[in-house]
Each structure stands twice: as C-alpha cells, then as structure tokens.
Amino acid sequence: MIKKAVLPVAGLGTRFLPATKASPKEMLPILDKPIIQYAVEESQKVGITDFLFITGKHKRAIEDHFDKATELEERLIKTGKDELLKKINSFENLNFAYIRQKEPKGLGDAILCAKPFIFEEAFAVILSDDVIDPDYSVLKDMIDIYKDKKAPVVALEEVSNEEVSRYGIVAGEKIGEDCYLIRDMIEKPEKSKAPSNLAIIGRYILTPSIFKYLEVLEPGKGGEIQLTDALRALLKETPIYGYRIKCQRYDAGEKFGYLKTIIYFALRAPEISDDFRKFLKDQLSCI
Ligand code: G1P
C-alpha cells in the first residue's frame, strides 16, 4: 500500500499576483475548497494518510487549513451547523508534516527534501496545480500498475505541439490500453525536439531509489534541479511506466486553466449547476 504523499507547494505563484502576494496560490478556491484540498482528498480516496508538504515562505495558511479549528468547531456545534462541521473535520484521520525548501531550486530539489520522511517505501507525488476530476481513479490506476510492476509510474496526457515545451515529455512504447513503458524523457523540450506529445502531468508513484539521483543532479532546464532528469537517470536502473489518464485535467496554476477548472466544477456542482448553466448561456448569447 502507498501511505505517503509528497506535495511540493513552495512555488511563489507569481502568475496570480497580486492575489498571491500574502497568501499561497494553493489556497485559491475552486468553489468552496482551496485547490490544495482537492489534491489531499484525491489521495485520501486511495488510502494515503501521511502528507508531506514541501513549503516555502508565505505558506502558513496551508498548515492552518489542515489543522484543527477548535473555536470554529465549537461555534458550529453551538449553532447546530452539522453539515459544515463535517466539511471542516474531514482531515481528522490524516497526518500532515511540513518541510521548508531552503531555496527555490526546482521540483527535483523539492522532492529531495522529502528523503527523511520516506524511508523504504514507495510514495506518491502530487502537483496540486494539476487538478483532476475526482470521479476518475487516476491514482488508483497508477498504484495498480505500481503493484503489478514494482516500478515507478508517471501520469501522462497527450498535449498539442504548441504545449510540449511546458511539460516533461516522454518517449514510450504502448504496452497496454493506457500503459506505456517509458524509454526516455526530456524536460520542457522545444517543439522540434519533443520525442512525442505525451506529457508528464502532476501525479507520480516513486520509489526511494530516486533520491540518490536527485542528490547528484546538476541543474537542468531553467537552471533548476529537475525531477524529469532524475527519472531519466533512474531509467538505467529500473523500468518506469506511464499511465495515460482518461479524464480531464486542468492546470489551475495559470489564469485560464484556473478559470476552466472553476467552470468545470461549477457545471457539476448540484447546488448551483442549473443556475450556472443558465447564466453561462445568457452571457454567451449577449456577446
Ligand atoms: C513540472 C515538471 C514537468 C511536468 C509538469 C506537470 O513542471 O517539471 O515535467 O510535466 O510539472 O504539471 P512545472 O509545471 O512545475 O514547471
């Protein structure tokens, strides 16, 4: 079983300034929950109980969000707001730990910060900017591949030629309906150098063997320690598999993607979907 998840949240969120000047981008809401909560709930559903956030400055709101809110709870009990109480109590059986990334040296460096927390077991890495429809079982399917192959698994999505330079791109061989054996990978290649259109998206099942490669890695793309480069080095030692997701994934880490995420969830939220649909139709008909 995979019990631990690592969530890198040290990024500055400059794309959302000034909203992120004093509060983390991970706390921006999608309807009534912050982005980061979707990642935790997705992990909770597959039995993950121990969460390690790799944080930076101005991220205290994330710690507070997953902490017990005694005063608020007392008030909700007194006023009989049981439904709300349930909503804010849903993390009670989970453990949260926080490590600060000392410098913003990249995703690979952030994952290396998790080494003292991991010991010998495999673990999940969740990049919370990549929001996935919670009705789909991406993590479960990835864990199933991990259990079968006993090797790391990354989530994949096909992207357009214009988008390859924003992602880690893999060269892989299709070995099952949604499963690939990865032959090579490259971080944010130019369009002409991309080996395929299959992009790594923010879900990984990793084994502790990644740490020894991260420890000796030179800075790569953008002068940062890249997880993709460490995985590429790891390919010499173990096969790595790709799981091609079957659902929508939205990049809530940039403005248009964030807006799409909100619209996607709003159209599926029973309490507002009808009104929202009507509102959208009216708006579209008058422009
Ligand atoms: C990171 C990874 C990249 C991956 C992407 C998925 O990039 O480095 O390989 O494709 O996440 O969202 P970032 O978006 O942090 O620049």
Image (cartoon, grey):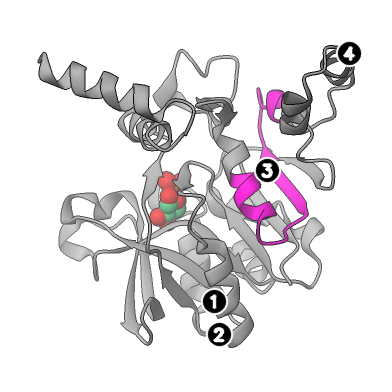
Q: Which of the pair 183/109 is nearer the observer? A: 183
The label nearer to you, 1 versus 3, is 3
Residue 43 is inside the magenta segment: yes
Q: Which of the pair 128/268 is nearer the observer? A: 268
Q: Is mark 1 within 8 Å of ligand 1?
A: no
Q: CA distance from mark 1 to mark 2?
A: 6 Å
Expressed as whole percent of the image width and height from the top left, the position of residue 141 reads 53, 71
Left or right of 33? Residue 82 is: right
Expressed as whole percent of the image width and height from the top left, the position of residue 150 reads 62, 84
Q: Earlier in the sequence, mark 2 or mark 4?
A: 4
- At label 3, which amino acid type do we have? Ile
Q: Earlier in the sequence, mark 4 or mark 3?
A: 3
Q: Quadrant of the C terminus?
A: top left
- At label 2, which amino acid type do we have? Thr
Residue denoted by label 2: 238
Disc assigned to residue 234:
1
Badges 1 and 3: C-beta atoms under 8 Å apart? Answer: no
Disc assigned to residue 54:
3
Residue 86 vs 155, above or below: the answer is above
Q: CA distance from mark 1 to mark 3?
A: 22 Å
The label nearer to you, 4 versus 3, is 4
Q: Earlier in the sequence, mark 4 or mark 1?
A: 4
Identify the secondary structure beneath mark 3: strand
Badges 1 and 2: C-beta atoms under 8 Å apart? Answer: yes
User: Which residues are drawn in magenta?
Assistant: 39-62
Q: CA distance from mark 2 to mark 4?
A: 56 Å
